Amino acid sequence: MTELGSIGKSVRRKEDYRFITGQGHYTDDINRPGQAHAYFLRSPHAFARIKSIDISAASAKPGVVAIYTGKDMAADKVGGLICGWTVKGKDGQPHKAPRHDAIAVECVRHVGDQVAVVIAETYAQAKDAAEAIEVDYEVLKPAIDLRDALKPGAPQVHADAPGNLCYDWDFGDKAATDAAFAKAAHVTRVELLNNRLSPNPMEPRSAVAEYDRGTDMTTVYVTSQNPHVLRLILCAFVFGLPEHKVRVVAPDVGGGFGSKIFNYPEETVAFWAARKLRRPVKWTSDRSEAFLTDAHGRDHYTIAHLAMDKDGKFLGLKVDTLANMGAYLSTFASAVPTYLYALLLAGQYTTPAIYAEVKAVFTNTAPVDAYRGAGRPEATYVVERIVEAAARELKLDPAELRRRNFIAADAFPYQTPVACVYDSGQYALTLSEAQKMIDYAGFPARKAASAKQGKLRGIGISCYIEACGIAPSAVVGSLGAGVGLWESAKIRFNPTGSVCVYTGSHSHGQGHETTFAQLVSDKLGVPIDQVEVVHGDTAQIPMGMGTYGSRSLAVGGSAISKAADKLIEKGKKIAAHLMEASPADVSYGNGVFSVAGTDKSVPMAAVAFTAYVPHNYPADLEPGFEETAFYDPANFTFPSGCHIAEVEIDPDTGITKIANWVAVDDFGNVINPMIVEGQVHGGIAQGVGQALLEGVVYDTESGQLLTGSFLDYTMPRADDLPSYNVAMTHTPCPHNPLGVKGCGEAGAIAAPAALMNAITDALGTEAIQMPATPLKVWQTIQSHKPALAAE
Amino acid sequence: MYEFNYHRPTSLAEASKLLAGAADGKFVAGGQTLLPTLKQRLAAPSDLIDLGGIAELQGIKVDGGSVSIGAGTRHGVVAKSAEVAKAIPALAKLAGGIGDAQVRNMGTIGGSLANNDPAADYPAAVLGLNATIHTNKRTIAADDYFKGMFETALEDGEIIVKVTFPIPKRAGYVKFPNPASRYVMVGAMVAETASGIRVAINGAAPCVFRHKEMEAALAKSFSADALKGIKTDPKTMNNDIHASAEYRAHLVGVIAKRAVLAAG
Ligand SMILES: Cc1cc2nc3c(=O)[nH]c(=O)nc-3n(C[C@H](O)[C@H](O)[C@H](O)COP(=O)(O)OP(=O)(O)OC[C@H]3O[C@@H](n4cnc5c(N)ncnc54)[C@H](O)[C@@H]3O)c2cc1C
């Protein structure tokens, strides 16, 4: 890797200048001439039949351009929103995906569901007019609680999903798993709630749609993580329009965490209304709407059993999960608790038999879909909590129990019993590094010191596995995905030597403009400031698949690398011509083409210039210096790592203080360590948020959202978080050209189990669920009375 | 937010006149409570009368026995006042723990007391330190001022002008913040004053209240240990997703003890 200039260096982020100086261009910053503003009237009820809607008074309000209801969209034959991944249940039948209208037609199914849209000259006028719309509801009893929704007699969210069941799915070898349990010396059982989370990206969702009658082109600027897929859905499923007449632009996007992958009702309505009115239509969510309508994450209830032999060797794992889908099936909702979850249940271990059953359930709550980690945090939470609980039951050191069951470093590629073939990893190494960093051996003394102060101290390990760059397309297709999961890249040299990189990945906080520029700079010998990374505009970039699942570098970066290789190949021919040598004798490195054994060389910039000014040029070669590549990975890539959390609990208040946090992650090769560390920090923050602070709460009777603002939804603040001790090991991915894995979700995957293992260690009971708020910790202390005596 | 007329009077008399003349007028000080309410369209006053231009409402005065704070004084000013910190450190600490820097730079003591949010900080200071509230019409003793949840002794149109805190022998304030909002979930101001020991508990119940049993115990012995075994009835406590009534009742004991320790 000697030729690599900036790779591995913490280059400052190119994009930060505009972000830090307030010069980013977000969707809400975009204003089009003649634009009108949309405001949605939303359901105040969790479940109700719309008996009538009277818009007459509202229509007469100042500035109103139009008011539309679901019936108007239906009259225009606008399609419902789709779920792009079809999961087949145990019975072989596809999941139930009841119609999801962008504006409700007959029934509203969660608080915040769209009832009507008002389009007016100003946003305030639209809002004023919305108050004058009269809706007559027949209020129905809602199904809110996940478990209650499955009970006989529960209110039915959709007539065409009997029993509120979206699917009843299973995965793995049931017979082999049953046999494993039959011969077990010990079985550990855990009951786990994986709390529902609100994604809360800093930038709320927004869309500006406009229609150009002259060209028949519809353009929508939108807060999206994957503009091409959104265009595909809008064109092929919702509106029946040709894709060449639709342009989707996702400009600067202020965070997504998964919540901006999906096709949402509001942008769909803005798109439709702009065409109908022949006026640009803008909509921006406020924070209250974001709480009500951004797709939530997680929300699982799980009972798991782990079978072990007398030495603690894992024999089998059985997992039974209920997953809340909310009121409608969001774009990728069905895949999250199935293929992104059960396939990861082997964790880092050699467990030979695994069987998972998942029931997906409709409730009268906001839709639930992918959120940072999407399925994989839920899997890690199950595996790492049950392993820790098992160690306690067996009175074994949890680190030791893990070591007895790790997949060995020389066992890769490793076929798990749940379909995945792990590419590489050094699990024992990451664990022992983390143990060293946190002084694991010194923990009993620290615990005794805490006890002297009247505090409960605990330590918890989480050895996680992550699957990034979900692929290859043929495999995900066979599992029900409606799309391929490759990525595209185009690299265009400009005549004077600078470079534009067009990537199908989308950056909304990940720093692609820097990481990808480093990659291109390094491969093509162009200074970083001469590389422009372009993303997010379907009119500029080749068809791309967007950013989610920590796929951008492993898949998008690999596509860029392939395109760069093509340029180097072409460059060799041009350079050979210029140096009057045979292409076979030309070698390339560090931005220079040279002929072995001579002092002849041509720099990359001269080759690029020659390609555009081909006065002295190979006769059989096309002019121009631009290449496109598509990359479909051979496999997922599997980052892994070990996080250890140490906590101290004040039994008087129930407050948990994070005393120390170490993370040893293995993301394969690393291009920009600073950016990677930043991703780890952010991921841990969200994981700590899930374990200690955050949780969406609906009133189980009325279905009202009780955590509808930051007054009640506890977002982590800086002082809730510890100073992390972050380190890395590097086990390259063997099957992509960069040897990289993915780092975006790791922290959020690892952290909850580490923290809950530490808290349950301190409390001496497994009987506490996330978020471990001071209230819950105190209540657990009251009911379990942990011993405070020093050991 | 609905539209409203905006006024910025420079005297109390002018403010009163503007309010009397408005269809449905409302005073605004720092706006940290009122503006969020307006933004959510939960209130629709015809006129906002900004008290920020009235010089009389500004400023901090410390004389021999008391600290007097103008109603329009921002939390941040109180928090950073060297005079307050010297005279009643617990009061400066309390002000410095309200909301965040932006809130402290706008919010005022008068606005906080007029609002009387059960989860607000200042009510504990006023009740615990036995302060006097001066309005444009009269003076109101702390014990007569707090009437219930968001309810005070203020009459319609009455303006708080200043609050006078007698300097206590010692006082300590400790707040257990709500994890989400960081308002008070349970707080305690414990003070030894000229008129005896006072323990004001905020955040826990619908309105700030004096914990008489604790006061009696501390009068015998001003120590955290003196509060041991004193129970607070959960039936009188608030109950929400962040804290059950039982938990709040328990925290009252814990936080009061810590306030005693903080008082030194
Ligand atoms: C994010 C956030 C966090 C917060 N955290 C806390 C916290 O931790 N602890 C806490 O105690 N508070 C907290 N607050 C509330 C804050 O302290 C407010 O500033 C305070 O409650 C109201 O003061 P104000 O000057 O902003 O009043 P305004 O919002 O302007 O007015 C509030 C009410 O008081 C009336 N009023 C104002 N001045 C007078 C006067 N002189 N005489 C009579 N009536 C008057 C107004 O008419 C109105 O009805 C927080 C607020 C926010 C936005």
Image (cartoon, helix red, strand yellow):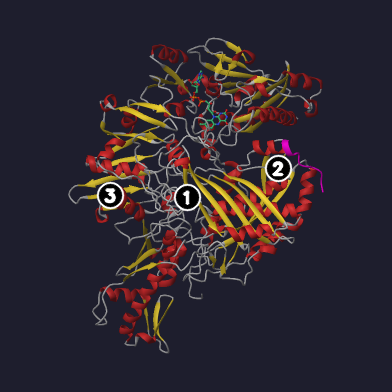
Mark with earlier residue (1, 3): 3
Q: Nearer the viewer, residue A582 or B192?
A: A582
Place of residue B192 in the rendered image (x, y in percent of width and height, measured from the top left): 74, 22
Label tally: 3
Amino acid on which disc 2 is placed:
Ile
Position of A298 with respect to A54 (left or right) is right
Position of A557 with respect to B65 (left or right) is left
Foreground tag (1 vs 3): 1
Mark 2 near mark 3, Cβ–Cβ under 8 Å?
no
Q: Is residue B145 visible?
A: yes
What stretch of residues is rendered in magenta?
A782-791
Amino acid on which disc 1 is placed:
Ala
Few, some or many C-alpha atoms within 10 Å of disc 3 (few <14, some 14-19, many ≥20)?
many
Place of residue A569 in the rendered image (x, y in percent of width and height, measured from the top left): 36, 78
Position above or below: A253 against A269: below
Residue A189 among those drawn in magenta: no
Position above or below: A354 against A192: below
Real-space CA distance between mark 2 and mark 3, rounded to the nearest whole angstrom: 54 Å
Q: Chain of mark 1?
A: A
Q: Nearer the viewer, residue A258 or A653?
A: A258
| Residue that badge 3 annotates | A219
Few, some or many C-alpha atoms within 10 Å of disc 1 (few <14, some 14-19, many ≥20)?
many
Figure quadrant of residue A593: bottom left
Place of residue B17 in the rendered image (x, y in percent of width and height, measured from the top left): 42, 12
Place of residue B141 in the rendered image (x, y in percent of width and height, measured from the top left): 63, 13
| Residue that badge 1 annotates | A370
Position above or below: B221 against A515: above
Amino acid on which disc 3 is placed:
Thr
Q: Chain of mark 3?
A: A
Few, some or many C-alpha atoms within 10 Å of disc 2 (few <14, some 14-19, many ≥20)?
many
| Residue that badge 2 annotates | A649
